[in-house]
């Protein structure tokens, strides 16, 4: 989820606008007292604003719908970010939704008033450089910022990372007029790649969520970036005794791992056999509780034994880590 | 720094033919108090916002869980990450997953 603080209902208080992996934008309305319990953003027909792919909470399933798509056809496109801007300069805020899959951006106009938004329920694809915007590395969230200080809003977005291991932050300069934004083709602000592993976290290489601001108050725009680092601590030089110890630990770990797997299999077999005899959901739950209760201590012990051995092995052979953090990129 | 391809190639503002390369410095990890900011989040997403109304923009952190935290910014740096509260005192939670 990206986040935007914006006065979506023109009541003088900033609201908290975001979208989540359920495929729809959510808003926490702001007031003098703070932020209220979030609710889903609805269109003028009273339906959830969305792109196409969404989670239906009534039936607990992922579905697709074409009701908001430009061509009316459902697609595997899930809006996971939302940001509002007055696209047509009519005084109310319109909505931009970014998709996880394929990194598209969709515009949905507000035909209401500043204080009573009425989103049309129809999306239009946002173009960049004359072509529909897309990014195979999947869009995290777009941010609106006047990057080039020409008085209009430009767009900056990050990516999760592509199949080639590269993630990035991209800038779409707004070359349009007031009330008719027109974005230029994306320019790369930052590209990061997880290739060779550093021995400590040195920067985000995946799931890159940017904020654009003058963090150090020196008059230019910096990047504050959330994301994952991939790294591996430096491996110690092992003496002969340690090499032998590592070999022994590996053998022990393999045995412990097999024992743990065998126990899991035994649990599953017994549970499945007894569950077949159960007639009601209640009886099935009771079977699970009983059989799991019977195995729990042994399952936990087997898992703990494996983990303990793995931690010892990790001391000799540091594992690859993937850790989340937030980074400051100072602009030169 | 071959492991991290900091291409950092920001082109110049429009109107300048895009021939000037702007570079960002190497990233610096942000700490929140004694802890790493965002370390307990999945997919941390920062946004600047003056949560406590002291005139300084703090950092609000979203993430995959949907539970929002924030870190207060002062002249000394960022304070410990804590839950962002709603008007009813509960943590602001967008029910993400």
Image (cartoon, grey):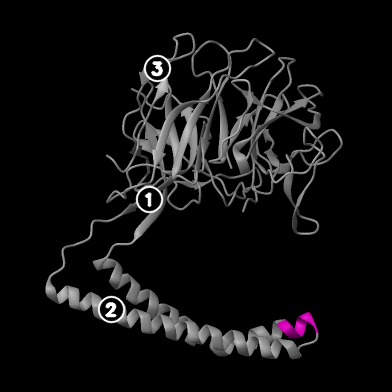
Mark 1 vs mark 2, CA separation in Å:
26 Å
Query: Which comes before the other along the chain, label 2 or label 3?
Result: 3
Q: Is residue A86 visible?
A: yes
Q: Please state, as top left, top right, bottom left or bottom right, where the C terminus of chain A lies in the image.
A: top left
**Is the residue A235 above or below the residue B32 in the image?**
below
Q: Is residue A68 left or right of residue B71?
A: right
- At 39% across and 78% down in the image, what residue appears? A306
Q: Please state, as top left, top right, bottom left or bottom right, where the N terminus of chain A lies in the image.
A: top right
- Camera-nearest residue between A217 and A233: A233
Name the residue that disc number 1 marks.
Answer: A230
Crowd band around label 1 with a 10 angstrom C-alpha radius: few (<14), some (14–19), many (20+)? many
Where in the figure is residue A55, as x and y percent of width and height? 73, 52
Q: Is residue A104 magenta?
A: no
Q: Secondary structure at mark 2?
A: helix
Q: Is residue A284 left or right of residue A291?
A: right
- Residue A249: numbered disc: 2
Discs 3 and 1 lie in a common subunit: yes
- At 40% across and 54% down in the image, what residue appears? A322
Query: Which comes before the other along the chain, label 1 or label 2?
Result: 1
Mark 2 vs mark 3, CA separation in Å:
56 Å
Name the residue that disc number 3 marks.
Answer: A219
Crowd band around label 3 with a 10 angstrom C-alpha radius: few (<14), some (14–19), many (20+)? few
Q: Nearer the viewer, mark 2 or mark 3?
A: 2
Residue range in magenta is A280-284
Q: Name the subunit of mark 3.
A: A
Q: Is residue B52 visible?
A: no
Where in the figure is residue A75, as x and y percent of width and height? 73, 44
C-beta proximity under 8 Å, tags 3 and 1: no
Where in the figure is residue B33, as x and y percent of width and height? 37, 45
Where in the figure is residue A284, as x and y percent of width and height? 73, 83
Query: Which comes before the other along the chain, label 3 or label 1?
Result: 3
Q: Name the subunit of mark 2.
A: A
């Amino acid at each position: 989820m990206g986040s935007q603080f914006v006065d979506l209902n023109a009541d003088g208080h900033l609201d908290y606008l975001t979208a989540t992996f359920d495929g729809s934008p959510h808003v926490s309305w702001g007031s003098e007292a703070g932020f209220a319990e979030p609710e889903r953003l609805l269109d003028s027909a009273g339906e959830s604003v969305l792109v196409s792919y969404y989670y239906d909470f009534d039936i607990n399933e992922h579905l697709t719908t074409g009701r908001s798509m430009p061509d009316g056809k459902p697609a595997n496109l899930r809006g996971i970010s939302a940001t509002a801007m007055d696209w047509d300069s009519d005084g109310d805020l319109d909505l931009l939704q970014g998709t996880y899959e394929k990194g598209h951006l969709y515009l949905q106009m507000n035909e209401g008033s500043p204080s009573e938004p009425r989103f049309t329920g129809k999306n239009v694809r946002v173009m960049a450089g004359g072509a529909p915007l897309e990014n195979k590395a999947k869009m995290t969230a777009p941010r609106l910022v006047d990057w080039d200080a020409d008085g209009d809003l430009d767009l900056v977005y990050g990516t999760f990372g592509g199949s080639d291991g590269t993630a990035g932050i991209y800038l779409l300069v707004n070359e349009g007029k007031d009330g008719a934004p027109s974005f230029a083709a994306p320019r790369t602000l930052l590209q990061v790649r997880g290739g060779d592993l550093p021995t400590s976290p040195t920067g985000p290489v995946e799931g890159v969520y940017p904020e654009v601001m003058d963090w150090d108050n020196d008059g230019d725009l910096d990047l504050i970036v959330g994301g994952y680092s991939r790294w591996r601590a430096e491996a110690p030089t092992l003496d002969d005794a340690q090499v032998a110890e590592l070999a022994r630990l590996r053998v022990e770990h393999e045995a412990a791992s097999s024992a743990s797997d065998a126990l899991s299999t035994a649990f599953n077999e017994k549970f499945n056999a007894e569950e077949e005899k159960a007639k009601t959901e209640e009886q099935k739950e009771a079977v699970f509780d009983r059989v799991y209760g019977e195995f729990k201590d042994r399952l936990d012990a087997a898992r703990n034994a494996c983990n303990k051995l793995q931690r010892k092995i990790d001391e000799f052979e540091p594992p690859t880590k993937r850790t989340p953090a937030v980074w400051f990129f100072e602009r030169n | 720094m071959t492991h991290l391809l900091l291409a950092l190639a920001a082109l110049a503002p429009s109107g300048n033919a895009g021939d000037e390369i702007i570079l960002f410095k190497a990233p610096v990890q942000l700490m929140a108090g004694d802890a790493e900011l965002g370390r307990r989040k999945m997919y941390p997403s920062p946004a600047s916002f003056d949560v406590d109304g002291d005139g300084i923009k703090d950092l609000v952190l979203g993430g995959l869980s949907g539970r929002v935290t924030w870190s207060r910014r002062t002249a000394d740096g960022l304070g410990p990450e804590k839950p962002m509260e709603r008007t009813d005192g509960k943590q602001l939670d967008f029910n993400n997953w």
